Amino acid sequence: MSDKRHPLLSRAACFALAVAAVLLLFTHRVAESQNDISRLVAVESLALRGHFYVDDSPEAQRIVEAGGHRVHYLIDMVYNKRDGHFYSSKPPVLTLILAAVPALLHALGLRFTLTGPGSALPLVLLTWVFIGWASAGAFYAFRRKAGDLIERPMVADLVTVLALGGTLFLSYSVTVNHHTPTAAAILGAFCLLGMPQAARQVSDRRAALAGFLMGLAAVIDIGPGFIYSIAFGLYILFYLRSWRTLVFFGLGSIPPLALHCAMQYSIWGSILPVQMIKGTKDYPLSYWHNRAGSDTWHIARTRYWLLTLFSMRGLFVLSPVLLVGVAGLAADVAEGLRGRRDPERAGRAFVALTVLFGIVFLVCYIGLATPTNFGGDCYGMRYYVGFMPLLAFYALRAWSRWSASRAFRLAFCVLGAISLLYAVLGMPYTWAEMDALTHPLIELLKPLRGF
């Protein structure tokens, strides 16, 4: 089936439907971690009770024994001194989006829970409709670009599966989280701005839609969302050299940003994320006064950043196909520097440097400024999911550049197969403490723990 047919009938669309079906099969039936429970408690409170605070949730009221101390069961819970209520620490816009369908079902008289007994079906539908389909949309965009670069459809399918499917973007697409919607939005904006082909012009409509996606990304996951909003804005200003495009990009970002500001200010009296507001975790029986597990790890900064890349949790150990992406990224930069008078090469280099800017910033910030806990009880480095599809695109670019070499094809397929294996393995273990896993493939990695 040709990629040149109507988008709704294209091979890329069929590919995305197949991905959505696979994600449905693997979607988590139970809320398993503090991360997703915190989000779901907020969604349930908003959908069923009509308010953001979570005081009346059973999970918020539970007190447990941990490390010899009595603490609140719900770790990601924060206290608001303005109104005396407890809230989830998650930013409000994604919570509002996720609550839309449950609120409608509740208004129609359906009774359900997202965290208690009998939550499997509502949880699966919520996750699949909002998270799974966002990821399927990213696979659609990626597969379309693969069709532009690779002539044979079957090969384009395979490269998409190995390059994008071989990352933790796939692993996290089966559970409620903020990383995969952000990554999908960033990839969508990247494509809308014509960056895969280093287009010199972008229509007003596409610029505005890209801005909307980046505004949404920034309020869902401030790390990658914010830095790539800046990076794409600089790309428009210095490569496209179009104030008009930049204005439409900015205008498109206003609705999600304004919604975040309005909601956040109404609750907290500040538009800053909760994590930047002092004192929200200072309350009786707060877990953060008596931390346990990975939250007690203290790893030297001089090696922590390196462990986030090369260790049993490392980006390039669990997804070695992304090393090919690094090579493709470097090749575009090098070609552009060598052929600066060639507009096409220079354009590709500018795009690659834009992507690299975001990656380096995030690795430095996460490695040097955030807690040294690898994101807590989770599979791999979830904080890097935001840029994984972009790096996967450069693995695709590398295939289009070097696939004439049999050695390259073999190396790509081997690295891609290993990556896909670990990505699929991570789907049921998304919120597990990796040190506690006894799966043979995880046991193989434990000598690489690194601390």
Image (cartoon, grey):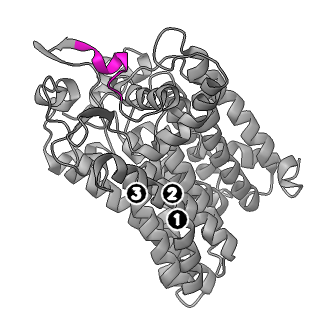
Q: Answer with left or right where residue 140 lies relative to residue 274.
A: right
Rendering quarter of residue 245: bottom right
The three-letter code of the residue at mark 1 reads: Ser
Q: Give the labeled residue for mark 1.
A: 253
Image x and y of residue 337, in percent: 47, 81
SS for callout 1: helix
Q: Nearer the viewer, residue 341 or 187?
A: 187
Instruction: Single out the residue that lies furthest toward the top.
Output: 117
The residue sitting at 30% across, 44% down in the picture is 308
Q: Between tags 3 and 1, which lies in front?
A: 3
Residues under numbered marks 2 and 1 in contact, where contact means CB atoms less than 8 Å apart: yes
Q: Answer with left or right where residue 379 lies relative to residue 24.
A: left
Q: Give the labeled residue for mark 3.
A: 261
Mark 2: few, some, or many residues within 10 Å (few <14, many ≥20)? many
Q: Nearer the viewer, residue 255 or 164?
A: 255
Marks 3/1: CA–CA distance: 12 Å
The stretch in magenta equals 54-63
Q: Between tags 2 and 3, which lies in front?
A: 3
Q: Answer with left or right where residue 29 lies relative to residue 230.
A: right
SS for callout 2: helix
Q: Give the labeled residue for mark 2.
A: 256
The three-letter code of the residue at mark 3 reads: Cys
Residues under numbered marks 2 and 3 in contact, where contact means CB atoms less than 8 Å apart: no
Q: Nearer the viewer, residue 245 or 201?
A: 245
